Amino acid sequence: MNIILFGPPGAGKGTQAKKMSDHFGIPQLSTGNIFRENIKKETPLGKKVKSILDAGRLVPDETVVDLVTDELEKNDYKNGVILDGFPRTVNQAEALEVYLSEKGETIDYFITLDVPEEELVERILSRGEGRSDDTAEKVKTRLKIYRDETEPVLNYYKEKGAVKEINGVGSIEEIFNRIKNAVS
């Protein structure tokens, strides 16, 4: 089973992806986690990504697609994947479709978490991850970039009929139950 967990920054994708991974027995692939690990280790990719993120911009499609497809080649993902934070652009979605079709696979579920913007800003500023772009102004920049560049991915998958919209407000367990109901 291949699932895309989608939504704006602060929607709870990482939290829900972990719960889904445990529940369905499918590994989570988080581009954010891969980037953070590379930044922490100060790898060439990490240094490149950090400078991009520090400016409040998105990492270029080619870099992200290469990173994800390399990761998906690992044996861990032979029974499926929960993609968290990918794809973020229509170009990335199209590249993912090509990659999966070459393997005879598709996206089974595209789950989007709907959360009002005020709630997103509050969540991001209160989660205390210490990201250099976690200021109210930078968060609003990230949300604008999301609306402009990432939201079209939602429309791309809506055209394919794969989208399950989930109310992303409530307790972690309430939201997770909505996801389980949508996937069952």
Image (cartoon, rainbow, N blue to C red):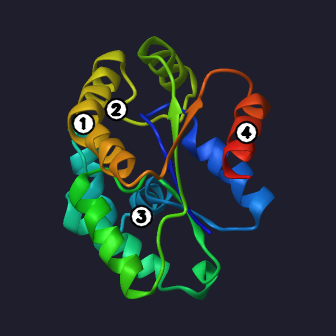
Q: CA distance from mark 1 to mark 4?
A: 29 Å
Q: Position of residue 28 (x, y in %)?
A: 60, 62
Q: Which residue is mark 2?
A: 133
Sequence-first tag of 3 and 1: 3
On the rendered structure, is 46 left or right of 121?
A: left
Q: Which residue is mark 1?
A: 56
* Secondary structure of the residue carrying numbered label 4: helix
Sequence-first tag of 1 and 4: 1
Q: Please give the label number shown on residue 90.
A: none
Q: Position of residue 15 (x, y in %)?
A: 65, 42
Q: Which residue is mark 4?
A: 176
Residues tagged 4 and 2 counted as in contact (Cβ below 8 A): no
Q: Is residue 138 above or below residue 100?
A: above
Sequence-first tag of 4 and 2: 2
On the rendered structure, is 24 left or right of 140?
A: right
* Secondary structure of the residue carrying numbered label 3: helix
Disc 2 marks a residue whose amino acid type is: Asp
On the rendered structure, is 12 left or right of 90?
A: right
Disc 4 marks a residue whose amino acid type is: Phe
Q: Which residue is mark 3?
A: 38
Instruction: Characterize the local packing of mark 3: few (<14), some (14-19) or many (20 or more) Cα atoms within 10 angstroms.
Output: some
* Secondary structure of the residue carrying numbered label 1: loop
The nearer-to-camera label among 1 and 4 is 4
Q: Quadrant of residue 80?
A: bottom right
